[in-house]
Amino acid sequence: MPHLSSTATGVAQTDVAVGFGVPGFAHPLLAPTEWAELTRPDTPLHWVVLNIDNGPGDRPDPHCLDAAGRLRNAGVRVLGQLDVTYGARGFGELVSDAHRYLDWYLVDGFFLGRCPTERTALPEVARTVTTLRALLRDGSDDGHIVFGHGTHPHPGYADTADQLVTFAGPWSDYRWSQAAEWTADHPPERFCHLVHGMPGGHLDEALRVARWQGASTIYFTDRTDTGPAGDPWESLPGYWDEIVSRVGPGVSE
């Protein structure tokens, strides 16, 4: 996945509340341990993505409803995944999916997967987000919106979402990646990095990369995207307990 070759933010953050953005597990019947683990007290979770079938699915799923309910009862923000397909999906389809997520699972916001990055797509994405926030505002607030770019987009996207995923890819790329210069104009709370294929022995190095580039929401896993499903996020990393202890409450990054 391409990354902009620009100078890193260059200033290590010492007072940033680092936590996890979980990009979604397998179905709760297939990954019951994973979903249960997310409700463990003092796990520093910023949000968890609920993705039933690359979206909300065709009908309510009681197992997903139970998993989402347990997370929300534990004070964890649950986001419904909307597949933007790099701008190919229409406004009506996305809003319809959003309605189903809200009606069936009472989500707290949305993760816009495969979000476009170019400036020309920004007006349509902004239009969609305006509608999503209006739908969410029928609840307690206007929710939380994350753009799943996976790389650095045009800087205008930072004015529309609460957070941008500016890296999603393998550790072999992440360890040499750099942040776009414009990210230095925003606090670390605005950025998220999702890294797969990362051996446990590199946790300290990976946390330094995230800190140096100014991202306070992270998810690191040793899983890869070469399995049968091609999805490295479907299960917990083998070093989950260790990384929770590294970034948990009271731990300064």
Image (cartoon, rainbow, N blue to C red):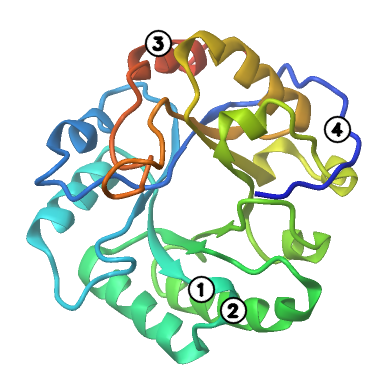
Q: Are marks 2 and 1 in contact (CB under 8 Å)?
A: yes
Q: Which residue is mark 2?
A: 87
Inter-mark Cα distance, 1 to 4: 28 Å
Rendered image: mark on residue 8: 4
Rendered image: mark on residue 242: 3
Q: Secondary structure at mark 4?
A: loop
- Viewer-side label of 2, 3: 2
Q: Secondary structure at mark 2?
A: helix
Q: Quadrant of residue 154?
A: bottom right
Type of amino acid at the residue the image marks with label 4 = Ala
**Residue depicted at x 12% and y 64%:** 61
Query: Which one is in front, 217 or 74?
Result: 217
Total numbered badges shown on the rendered structure: 4
Q: Is residue 69 above or below residue 13?
A: below
Q: Which residue is mark 1?
A: 84
Q: Position of residue 214 (x, y in %)?
A: 74, 33
**Residue depicted at x 50% and y 75%:** 132
Q: Is residue 58 above or below residue 218?
A: below
**Is residue 238 rendered to the left or right of residue 179?**
left
**Residue depicted at x 28% and y 47%:** 72
Type of amino acid at the residue the image marks with label 1 = Val
Rendered image: mark on residue 110: none
Q: Position of residue 222 (x, y in %)?
A: 42, 25
Look at the image and tell me in which quarter the C terminus lies.
Answer: top right
